[in-house]
């Protein structure tokens, strides 16, 4: 019985239930726990055999429950394996239903957290899905994709549009695409920021020199400003020419 996960509470009940039923069935004891093997009413030998098998079933259940669980169900007051199993179900299956409702609420109300990465946000969603599946509440891949799409920032609209236009992949493929896009964004972001800084600096420089251009009619100043303007355009530092509309160099 070392390979049976111990019952610690509602969070482990479904796995324990699955394992314990297989173990009991393999030893022809499941009927005693489920109540289908009724206690004989008269034959002393049959009663003794029944009590012996029921005791074996009780031992298996007790050995696979934590001390905390046994205390909670008042195990010493329960006379048969069916009584013990029924008590466990009455307590922990209700708790399982409560946990399912709470996790479903968390899943469908989850909002994008800008302080963490897209990958981490997706992992948070997946953790809730895994917990629900462990409680016997499967969530389809389609619903997981829909949830992820609903929390994505506007920057990911192109990825979403492409996915929805050719929805022939798996959840894993979708998550992989998002991770690839995010990694590329991390590479491109410093370049964009550098370009924005350069554009801002260039704009201020251009304003300064255009002011000189308008005040000083000396040909050297005009030629210097013309060369600077041409250089900035060539380097890609300027994307707009509003500052020099109407000027002829």
Image (tube, rainbow, N blue to C red):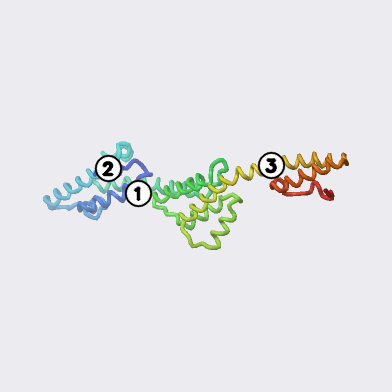
Q: 139 left or right of 208?
A: left
Circle 1 is placed at which residue position? 14
Depth check: 32 or 18 in front? 18
Q: 195 left or right of 178?
A: right
Q: Residue 160: where, in percent of width, then height?
A: 56, 56
Give the secondary structure at mark 3. helix
Q: Are marks 1 and 2 in contact (CB under 8 Å)?
A: no
Task: Work out which quarter of the rendered image holds the N terminus and state it.
Answer: top left
Callout 2 environment at 10 Å: few (<14), some (14 to 19), or many (20+)? Answer: many
Depth check: 181 or 81 in front? 181
Q: Residue 156: where, in percent of width, then height?
A: 58, 52
Front disc: 3 or 1: 3
Q: Quadrant of residue 9?
A: top left
Give the secondary structure at mark 1. helix
Please name the residue shown 53% across and 63% down the image.
166
Please name the residue shown 82% across and 42% down the image.
210
Q: Residue 151: where, in percent of width, then height?
A: 56, 50
Distance from the alpha carbon under mark 3 to that under mark 1: 60 Å
Distance from the alpha carbon under mark 3 to that under mark 2: 68 Å
Q: Is residue 206 above or below residue 23?
A: above
Q: Give residue 64's mark.
A: 2
Give the secondary structure at mark 2. loop
1 or 2: tag closer to the N-terminus: 1
């Amino acid at each position: 019985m070392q390979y049976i996960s111990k019952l610690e509470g509602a969070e482990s009940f479904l796995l324990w239930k699955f394992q314990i039923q297989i173990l009991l069935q393999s030893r022809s004891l499941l009927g005693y726990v489920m109540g289908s093997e009724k206690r004989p009413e008269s034959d002393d030998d049959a009663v003794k055999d029944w009590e012996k098998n029921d005791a074996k079933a009780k031992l298996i259940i007790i050995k696979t429950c934590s001390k905390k669980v046994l205390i909670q169900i008042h195990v010493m007051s329960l006379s048969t394996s069916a009584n013990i199993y029924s008590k466990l179900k009455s307590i922990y299956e209700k708790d399982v239903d409560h946990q399912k409702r709470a996790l479903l609420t968390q899943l469908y109300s989850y909002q994008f957290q800008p302080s963490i990465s897209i990958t981490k946000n997706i992992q948070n969603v997946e953790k809730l899905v895994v917990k629900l599946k462990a409680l016997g509440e499967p969530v389809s891949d389609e619903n997981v994709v829909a949830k992820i799409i609903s929390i994505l920032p506007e920057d990911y609209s192109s990825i979403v549009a492409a996915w929805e236009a050719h929805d022939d992949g798996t959840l894993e493929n979708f998550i992989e695409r998002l991770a690839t896009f995010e990694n590329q964004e991390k590479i491109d972001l410093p370049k964009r920021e550098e370009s924005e800084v350069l554009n801002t600096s260039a704009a201020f420089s251009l304003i300064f020199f255009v002011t000189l251009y308008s005040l000083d009619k000396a040909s050297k100043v005009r030629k210097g400003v013309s060369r600077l303007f041409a250089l900035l355009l060539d380097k890609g530092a300027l994307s707009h020419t509003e500052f020099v509309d109407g000027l002829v160099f």
